[in-house]
Image: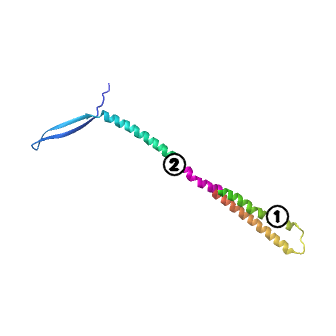
Amino acid sequence: TKPTLLWLRQVTLPVIHNRQVIGYLQIAMPMARDREFLSRYLLLLILTVLIALGAISCAGWFLGGLAMQPILQSYEQLQRFTANASHELRAPLAAILSNAQVGLIAPIDKGASKHLRLEKIAEVAKSMNTLIGNLLLLARRTGDL
C-alpha cells in the first residue's frame, strides 16, 4: 500500500531560563483541513477566472461591434457617394459628348471653326470622362482597403 503523506505545520521555539537555552518546544498541527480549504479555494479561483474571461470576451465582442458601426456607416456612405457621383458626373458628360459627336456628323458647311470647336468639345469631354472614371476607381479602391 502507498503510505499517506501527512502535511504538518510545525513551530519550534527555544525555551530560555536565566538567559540560557534549556531546550526547544516543538508544536505541530496537521494541515489536512487547510489543504482541503486551499484546494476548494483554488477550484473557486479557477472557475472565477474562467467566468471573468468569458464575460470580458463577450463584452469585448459587443463593444467591438459598437465601435465598428461608425466605420461601417462611413463605408456605406462612401459606396453611395461613388454610385451617385458616377451617375451625376457621367450623365452630363455623356450628353455633351453625344451632342458634340452629332454636330460632327453633320455635313461641314461654311463654318469650319464650328467643326473644330465641336472636335475640341468632344476631346475635352472624353478626357473628362476618363478623369472621372479614374477618380471614381480610386475612390472605390480606397474604400476597399
**Looking at the rendered structure, which numbered label has been put on residue 98?**
1
- Do the residues bearing badges 1 and 2 touch, measured as CB atoms within 8 Å? no
Label 1: which secondary element: helix
All told, the count of numbered labels is 2
Q: Quadrant of residue 34?
A: top left
**Residue type (three-letter) at the residue carrying disc 2:** Gly
Magenta segment: does it hold 56?
A: no
Q: Is residue 3 left or right of residue 92?
A: left
Q: Residue at x 66, y 60 (%)?
A: 139
Q: Residue 41: where, in percent of width, then height?
A: 37, 38
Q: Specify the quadrant that holds the N terminus.
A: top left
Q: Residue at x 31, y 33 (%)?
A: 33
**Looking at the rendered structure, which numbered label has been put on residue 60?**
2
The answer to whether 115 is drawn above or below residue 134 in the figure is below
**Residue type (three-letter) at the residue carrying disc 1:** Ser
The answer to whether 16 is drawn above or below residue 140 in the figure is above
Is most of the magenta stretch helix, strand or loop?
A: helix
